[in-house]
Image (spheres, rainbow, N blue to C red):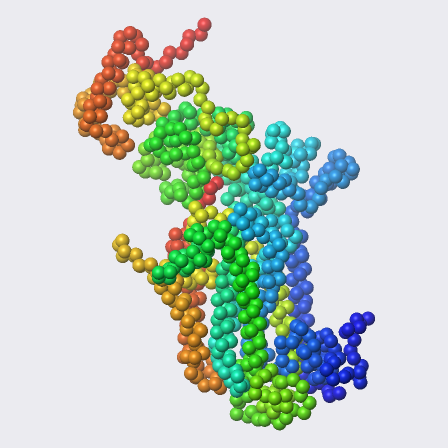
Amino acid sequence: MRLPFTRRAAAGETSPGVHPQPLWSYRPQSDREAGDAVVSNLLLHWFPSKVYKPSLAWNYSAWLGTISGALFFLLVLSGLPLMFLYVPSVERAYQSVKDIEYVVTFGWWIRAVHRIGAHLMVVAVVLHLARVFFTGAYKNGVGQGQQREWNWVIGVVMLLLTLFLSFTGYLLPWDQLAFWAVTVGTNIASAVPGIGPRIRELLIGGRAIEQATLIRFYVLHIIVLPGALGGLFAYHMWRIRKDGGLARADAAALAPDAKDTGPVPTKTYTLLGVARGTSPAVTARSPEAPDQTVNAVPDLTRRALIVILGTFALVSILASAIPSPLEEPANALITPNPAKAPWYFLWLQEIVTDTTIRLGSLTINGAFLGGVILPGLLVGLLTVWPWLDKSAVSTAGLWFPRSRRRQNLLFILAMLFILAFTFVGMFMRGPYWNLYWPWETWPGIPGRI
Amino acid sequence: MEKRTNSPFPRIDRPVLAAIGIVLVGATVFFAWSDRQHDYKYYQYAFRGMVAEKLGAERAATVPSGLQQVWVPGLRRADRCVTCHQAVSWKGFETAEEPHRTHPGDLLKSHPPERFGCSACHGGQGWAIDTAAAHGEVAHWEEPLLGKPLGEAYSLTDNKAALMQMNCNICHRYERATKGAEMINLAKDLVQEKGCRACHVINGRGGTIGPDLTWVGDKAPEQYDYSRLSGQTTAFAWHVAHFKDPRALVQDTVMPNFHLSTKQAQALAMLMLSWRKAPFDAAFLPGVPRTDPQTADERKAEEDMKTGPGAWFVQTGCFVCHSIAALKVRSPAQIGPDLSTAVEDTQKRFGVTVDQFLKNPTGTMSVVLSRQIVLTPEQKETAIQKLREAFAEYQRLVAEGKNPLAPPVEAAPK
């Protein structure tokens, strides 16, 4: 039995402005119905009616943005039950996490999904940024009013928000790992000359990591940062529509054999969603030609489902297989050995170590270079890169084009540098921050009994 | 109506989506299966069977199922041990295998589980509901179960389960002797007998040559120096080795080697680790004053030493190593020779007078007099004066036939 509002309108029953299929029509019978599915559905309304086919290719975008979005959705979803169970107080936070882990129904899985999802999101967002860089997708193409470079800037801000979200979540279990990772992280922040100690005080709400820090990080973690990220995410998607979809579509339009197709007879919606510059009676160029495009429903939605559900499945399997660690309760008097920053900041901690020079009694602290100058320089460069990149517009949307070889090489080198330092920090720094080969065993950490 | 444009997209997408669907179902099954993997389900089933067999089906129906816990707010504990150890308060399972054994002894009468929980005495992780995590055989858990396996790992001499007594002493620390805690009682006797207070403050009373031991159990394991210790690098192992030979672990220590047996060293190490702050309500403290009680004789002997003719030696700290029997000063450690005869003794041992020896000491005394007890020239004159007085007193006593250095004569049987 079909519910009344899912009834497909019979032939001849349609009238202008009334969509025959109020819900998502998974198997549209006509282009009109496929377009209606997008317009009449809240979840699908941000899709264009038709999509340039190569934009959907697995090997172009690897769908990393969709994966990041799916992970963000999963994190919000798994974070909600955790908010009901977690108590943001230094006396009870640790015990409430123990309870989530041991006695709350499915609590261990929800926490593991949240944890694994957060780690994967950092990875996915960084890879997404790398993909956009390598394909020069921040370059404006043929559409009028395109502002891809600003969407790139939004993306850089979203990466920083993702890192800060993960960092604030790190403190909440209030165990030794949390406490000391945040100690290391905020100490790096305090290396800013002059105002460093004040920045640290602002971050942790005092001079020691205490209740004030916990509630500050909690509110940032559950409201401020996800709210900001969610808002920017919506704007990020909206900009993609305004800029005419992925940069790859522009590259196709610029291809030598691109030709006007002439007015499309029965067009209802702007193709590719380029709002400005084309009127509803469009003369499309070849990327919008019927053989170059597919209906968003079901071809785009199906692939999006594959990616989103695949991400869910992967996170669930990892969450069931990898137990989430919880170390000893936070203790400001006992520094675990070694005390490490969260893994995505470890390359900074490693650089801080390597640039700290001791000459007799004189110590040159590397925290300013490794903790402030270098990351500041990298983020600054990333932000202004679209304006520094003078390569031809035709190279946008292509992987490793010849004319962008030098800057892509530079980016790869920077990534390898960060990865190498992260690896050293993660696997080669043992007790007392001494260097060990990955196959060497570290001396045992003493216990009480 | 126009036909829909044929999708030029690869048709493989549909089977891929179907496969992802199957993976998602598989992931859910895997998650549900992981969630069901708890030892307690089997143990509860087994215990119900044992009760049915022994006491009948009617009693078996009263065995609770699902997660169980003892919540003790006063001790800040929620102990879920009873989820598996269901027989703890049941009679009739005294000889059953763990976890289905009745709690041995009559300790539960004075320490009912609903008031004390389990982990306050036994250690372990009360929050956990799986064996490995609950018994502390997992990473990042500092309070392992203080049971036989751990005692065996440390090769405890007699009672392998004795480590638990450390937790008894967290509440019972001010008692002279606690029923059932033999190792702790042995250690407390040793503290009196060896006079640890000569050098160490314990519960607010004692000397200052060594570190304060009142809360030594809270010292972080990272703060010990394990470089000369072989075997387990734990605070407990360090204390055992240190009691057996202090100089082997800390080269320049002045702590004497008391030639303790392994059992004594283990008992003392347990006492050290039991001296820690634990947050609990005052109601859990047994009704004894929060100091170490002393008998009237002990108090008088201490008072005599402090105010009697040998008071100078006590105040200066000589008595830590030396007795001065003629002046009724008894050294707790008795490492050095009795000073009653020092005037003669320095001639015999070093070939110099006591004046010369104090001004130019040799051997151990050269270290002690340059580091621990630094005397001004005036104080050295006083020391010589006092030593002469002690010798005079000694000679007087010998003349009277009461040699203070003679070994005590056993009372003849009547």
Residue B193: percent from left, percent from top = 41, 24
Question: Above or below — where is B266 with respect to B40?
Answer: above
The image quarter containing residue B269 is top left
Residue B52: percent from left, percent from top = 75, 38
Closest to the observer: B305 or B250?
A: B305
The image quarter containing residue B80 is top right
Q: Is residue A184 left or right of residue B60?
A: left
**Furthest residue to the right?**
A1
Quarter of the image for the C terminus of chain B: give it: top left
Identity of the residue drawn at 50% across and 66% down: A161
Question: Above or below — where is B17 with respect to B337?
Answer: below
Identity of the residue drawn at 39% across and 62% down: A371
Res. A412 visible in picture: no
Identity of the residue drawn at 49% across and 49% down: A330
Question: Above or below — where is B334 with respect to B156?
Answer: above
Identity of the residue drawn at 60% across and 56% down: A83
**Furthest residue to the top?**
B414
Quarter of the image for the N terminus of chain B: give it: bottom right
Question: Above or below — where is A286 with respect to A443?
Answer: below
Res. A383 visible in picture: yes
Residue A347: percent from left, percent from top = 42, 63
